[in-house]
Amino acid sequence: MLKGYRSLLFYAASALLPVTADCVSADCGGSAAWRSLQHVQNAIGATNCSWDGDAVAFTNSRQTVRFYHSRRKADINGVTVWLNAPPYGSAPKGDWRMAGIDLDLLHLAVLPETEGPKKSLHVMLDPGHGGSDNGARSLDPPVNEKDLTLELSRKIGAALKDLGFKVSYTRTDDSTLTLDERSRLARKKKADLFISVHANHAGNKSAQGIETYVLPPSGYPGTAEGSRARGWQIGNRNDYHNTLLGFSIHRELTVLTDAIDRGLKRQSFFVLRETSCPAVLLEFGFLSNTEETLRMLDPDWQIQSAAAVAAGISSYAKKVDILDQSVALKRAKDAEANERWRKYLAERAAPQEAPEQTNSASRQDAELAAESEPETLTMVVSNPKPMPSFAVVPEPSPAKMHITAPPPVSANIIKTTPAELPPRLADDELSSSPLPKVTIITGTNTAPVQIDALLDFYETGKAQNP
Ligand SMILES: [Zn+2]
């Protein structure tokens, strides 16, 4: 009995770990859902998978996605995207894993290419800093960030209007605005999108390139060195939309301008977490780099960059309806499976008091939940194929070339009795060997650039506290 109760407690604890992509990691007890290579390949529809000893590349006829071992920087069709957690493990050994949240965001928000009619959207542009707050400064040539962001925002606004978008601004002159006032303006004017415009600064004078920031999902740290994970923020209700918006703009900026791609990154900046609509913060270049400063002052570069931002927003506007449907479908499925599982756990918690008939019904519910919820179970049962073949480069010795098929998963995983059901987490339970305990850690960022000043600006709360 004791053993039984212990396993009940285990199940009860696992039930507190929601399986939706909206709540993971620290918020949910420090455990993230991890996805296997096979699962990722199926989810993103890759026809080939290769491993070079460090990176896994998934490809199909149109897309290439590359993940690096223990690094958050990933390559999505040639665009740099920082993951929320670094993948780990080895593909040939069969223990490669990536965070479920990253797979969900890629699968639903980043990789889909289908476009529909362009949705009419109201875009609020937020020229960073202003008035008594100069922002970052370049001495030679002399430039204040507040002036550059205002000029860039005006040009982005003009490009957006040309494409038929409604545009408004948090400021159109050199006025001082708190961060709270900026977010409140977006809520008050019912903006559909919020675009905060900035220029970067770093101690390293050679640092250059474009960065696009969106809010990290709840429980995950930002990509800046030493960032800490936060709990759920208002902006987290838009995790998928933030990602689609950020990726769409960042891709156009890297394709349409010759800027260095520093990546789609994540940071819990005030205007990203407190704005209720999808929001991004753009860092167009480094005022600490003379060459880049001169380029940012060039009206032609400004027009080109503004057109790229507008093109990114236009791409978002053609995909957002489809994303709405995908996210609604996923949340409904997650909620339904969670409900079935909760019901089953509640009945198992008091088995003596429940009539036999109910137990039988609950078993059916549990089996249904087990079949429908963890996508991994569905995947394995519906597609019990061996692992994809790997292009292993460099070629290891024959002794080490043995690439194992995935752990044999027989139908008994599905057909176990309720007492033997695995905890409903990731597909890790499908692995025959115990997996390393991986926690979301901070400090995985290796970016050389210090953005202390920017972090300080957004993190201190000086502007938003009354
Ligand atoms: Zn700034």
Image: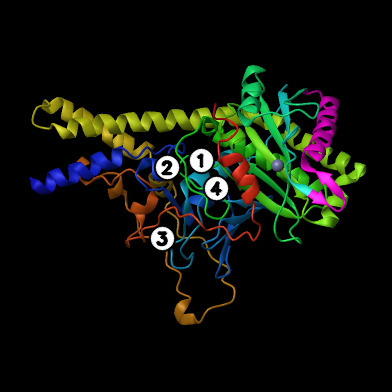
Indicate if the residue with disc 3 has its beta carbon within 8 Å of ligand 1. Answer: no
The residue indicated by pointer 2 is 24
Residue 234: where, in percent of width, then height? 52, 29
Residue that numbered label 4 is attached to: 222
Which residue in the structure is indicated by mark 1? 217
Decide which of tag 4 and tag 2 comes sooner along the chain.
Answer: 2
Q: Which residues are magenta?
A: 138-166
Q: Amino acid at mark 1?
A: Pro
Q: Nearer the viewer, residue 178 or 381?
A: 178
Q: Main secondary structure of the magenta part?
A: helix
Q: Given the current orientation, which residue lies at the most extreme front position?
A: 132
Q: Is residue 61 visible?
A: no
Amino acid type indicated by mark 2? Val
Relative placement, left or right, of 41 versus 367 is right
Residue 284 percent location from the top left of the image: 76, 46
Residue 246 in picture, x, y percent from top left: 66, 40
The residues tagged by marks 3 and 2 sit, at their Cα atoms, a distance apart of 26 Å
